Amino acid sequence: MFYDFRIRFEIAHVKLISKSLDILKSISKGELTRLESLFQENKKTYTETKLDLPEIFDLRMNKLNLYLSDMQYKHLKNKFLNVLQLGDFGFLLVDVKQKFIDTGIIMKNKRMNSIEINLTKKEVDLIKTACDLYWKTLVGDFSFISQITNFKTEESFLDDLIEAGSIAKNLAGENSELSVEDKFVNRKAKWAYDISNAIDNLQKQDTIRNIGTLPKIKITKNG
């Protein structure tokens, strides 16, 4: 197999990508309540910046979970897809996820801080999609999911996703949108954004800066 890119990752990159791929798999199958468990990562930053009291945040997450559960029944009748029904996308997703799980184990056992991995363009594009889903969910932009799902839904699906995002954020007026750079947003969203941004700039050769605390991934084109 020809690999288009060789990419240098830190151990934190590998762990984040592995988790991002797992979330992408869940959402692609229709497990919408996974969004609530991911948004929970904002609890500490929400409370530390006094955007929410811990108990109020928890109450809102319960409300969000119920809303997403209703969406699962309304749009999917709680019948989730499996990997076979996801076709080539599903098999690619499983393969790439396993690759990063295995890589993480190797790095842990050998106490490696960084590693270089050969990846195809399809694999890199999939990683970008997974990282986009991760950081967009943490800023409450659930509408992105309508672009990546493989199941049929009612016309109101996008509106329901937007409403779910509004419940998650609990913001109003001019501050109704979160930015990935906001201090209210968990640092892992920033890491996912940086990985996605680096991939997005592969052909553009723009000078980009990380907004998170991790080093940039180093991407080398093979051939």
Image (tube, rainbow, N blue to C red):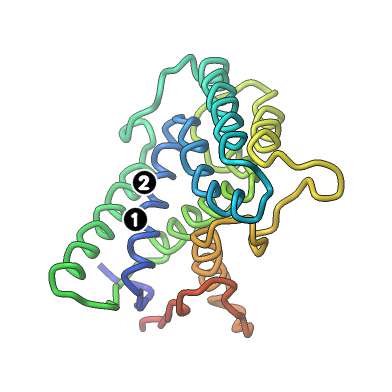
Q: In which quarter of the image is the N terminus?
A: bottom left
Dot 2 surroundings within 10 Å: few (below 14), some, or many (20 or more)? some
The three-letter code of the residue at mark 1 reads Ser
Residues at marks 2 and 1, CA–CA distance in whole angstroms: 6 Å
Picture mark count: 2
Q: Residue 22 carries which label?
A: 2
Q: What element carries label 1?
A: helix
Q: In which quarter of the image is the C terminus?
A: bottom left
Q: Is residue 24 above or below residue 116?
A: above
Residue with the mark numbered 1: 18
Please indicate whether residue 19 sits to the left or right of residue 104 in the image.
right
Q: In which quarter of the image is residue 4?
A: bottom left
Residue shown at 64% from the left, 21% from the top: 154
Q: What element carries label 2?
A: helix
Please indicate whether residue 5 sits to the left or right of residue 143 in the image.
left
Label 2–label 1 contact, CB within 8 A: yes
Q: In which quarter of the image is residue 113?
A: bottom left
The three-letter code of the residue at mark 2 reads Asp
Please indicate whether residue 167 sits to the left or right of residue 16 in the image.
right
Q: In which quarter of the image is residue 90?
A: top left
Residue shown at 22% from the left, 77% from the top: 112
Residue shown at 51% from the left, 38% from the top: 35
